[in-house]
């Protein structure tokens, strides 16, 4: 098979070594004679994976001891509802930063549960720039402030996080978790679907500060309560066992890469390589996000005309570059360069774009 370079936006590329390991032990997990897909989630073999993955998340993220790690179903989208169901209680108002499609969806779901207030919006900039987050006016009694750290569709990312004082900061990190170090203690709740930087679809990582649990009403359905999930160590019902197993392999891969700091250095190099091609193209290519908000994970760009774009997309596909068509709502092109995308693949794409310009510029 010719070389394949995977730039899909999610599910996205996983490290080749991880796929290899999963393949090798798929039918016979560590000599037990059965697949990890076929054994009880209460078995010792699965429980040790479950706890190892939690422990690795705590270590890699440097989580203080008062945080819990959960593995939930329902994708990041379920968190759009679970966050307000748990914390947007009677008489409270939740603050939302509206910086793109995903934060818009989170806000929309919260409005069904209770009162919300948009604290900052990127709508005027067509969501191509992160709104200013350093001077938010946050009422002291707010239930929480919700933010999306990386807007996957328009390719914009927070450079720094707002100081919300005593108001809990809740962040959707679906498309940039573990791509760069963060100061965990600044967040009260972090959630992320695994299928971009951490593994396959099917499991959502939730990290929650334990002191928040006391605020959760007892009247909400058990399965939607973070309280229940913490009490049962994410084993309240059958967890997505294979997804958690894969996440554990990816976490061990991150450790082998030298941790999140090393991964972040590589991610920056990958992003710089591609943005340089766009910026040095004399307008043949153009990055779609404002420079101060450019994402390190999703590089959105256009070419000089729609004819050229179509030609480019067709050639890219033919040459084995997958997943570069922009999101159906945004059009143009998008290169998603999550942790699992090797530097060499970004280099191959950068070289191809340069060469394509020479032929068509
Ligand atoms: N938030 C962000 C930032 C996303 O990129 C996505 C999916 N692309 C979602 C939420 C929704 O995730 P899921 O499909 O896991 O519900």
Image (spheres, rainbow, N blue to C red):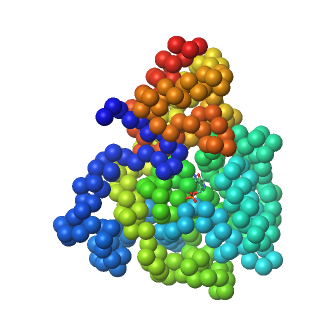
Using the image as rendered, state which of residue 164 and residue 98 is in the foreground: 98
* Quarter occupied by the N terminus: top left
Residue toward you, 242 or 253: 242
The quarter of the picture where residue 291 lies is top right
Tell me: residue 310, above or below residue 247.
above
Q: How many marks?
A: 0
Q: Nearer the viewer, residue 61 or 123?
A: 123
Asked whether the viewer can see residue 47, the reply is: yes
Residue 229 located left or right of residue 243: right
Residue placed farthest to the bottom in the image? Answer: 218
- Going 79% across and 57% down the picture, which residue do you hit? 118
Q: Tell me which residue sits at (66%, 33%) in the image.
A: 288
User: Is residue 343 in view from this perspective?
Assistant: no
On-image quarter of the C terminus: top right
Q: Nearer the viewer, residue 251 or 245?
A: 245
**Image position of 238 with respect to 16: above or below:** below
Please tell me in which quarter of the rendered image ligand 1 is found.
bottom right
Q: Position of residue 258 (x, y in %)?
A: 36, 47
Say if 193 sits above or below 215 in the image.
above
Residue 211 in the image, given as x and y percentages of width and height: 60, 76
Q: Identify the residue at horizontal 48%, vertical 68% (top origin).
A: 71
Where 161 falls versus 359 (above or below)?
below
The structure residue drawn at horizontal position 52% and vertical position 28%, both measured from the top left corner, is 314
Q: Is residue 202 left or right of residue 344?
A: right
Residue 181 at what x, y percent from top left? 50, 50
Q: What is the x, y in percent for residue 218?
A: 64, 86
């Amino acid at each position: 098979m010719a070389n394949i370079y995977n730039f899909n936006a999610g599910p996205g590329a996983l490290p080749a070594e991880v796929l290899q390991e999963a393949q090798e032990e798929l039918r016979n997990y560590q000599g037990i004679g059965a697949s990890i897909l076929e054994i009880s989630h209460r078995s010792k073999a699965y429980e040790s994976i479950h706890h190892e993955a939690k422990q690795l998340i705590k270590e890699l993220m440097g989580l203080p001891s008062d945080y819990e790690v959960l593995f939930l179903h329902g994708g990041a989208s379920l968190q759009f509802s679970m966050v307000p169901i748990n914390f947007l209680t009677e008489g409270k108002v939740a603050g939302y930063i509206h910086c793109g499609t995903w934060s818009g969806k989170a806000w929309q779901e919260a409005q069904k549960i209770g009162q919300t207030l948009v604290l900052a919006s990127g709508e005027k900039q067509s969501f191509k720039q992160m709104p200013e987050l350093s001077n938010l006016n946050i009422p002291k009694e707010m239930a929480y402030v919700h933010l999306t750290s990386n807007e996957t569709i328009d390719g914009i990312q927070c450079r720094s996080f707002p100081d919300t004082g005593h108001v809990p900061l809740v962040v959707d990190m679906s498309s940039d978790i573990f791509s760069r170090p963060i100061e965990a203690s600044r967040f009260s709740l972090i959630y992320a679907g695994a299928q971009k930087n951490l593994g396959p679809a099917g499991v959502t990582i939730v990290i929650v500060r334990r002191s928040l649990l006391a605020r959760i009403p007892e009247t909400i359905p058990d399965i939607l309560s973070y309280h229940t999930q913490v009490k049962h160590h994410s084993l309240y019902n059958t967890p997505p066992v294979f997804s958690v197993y894969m996440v554990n392999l990816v976490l061990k891969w991150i450790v082998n890469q030298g941790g999140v700091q090393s991964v972040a250095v590589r991610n920056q190099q990958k992003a710089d390589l591609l943005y340089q091609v766009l910026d040095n193209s004399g307008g043949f290519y153009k990055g779609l996000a404002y420079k101060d908000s450019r994402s390190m994970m999703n590089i959105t760009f256009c070419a000089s005309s729609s004819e050229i774009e179509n030609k480019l997309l067709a050639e890219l596909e033919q040459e084995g570059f997958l997943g570069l068509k922009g999101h159906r709502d945004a059009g143009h092109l998008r290169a998603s360069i999550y942790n699992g995308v090797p530097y060499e693949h970004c280099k191959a794409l950068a070289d191809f774009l340069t060469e394509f310009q020479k032929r068509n510029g």
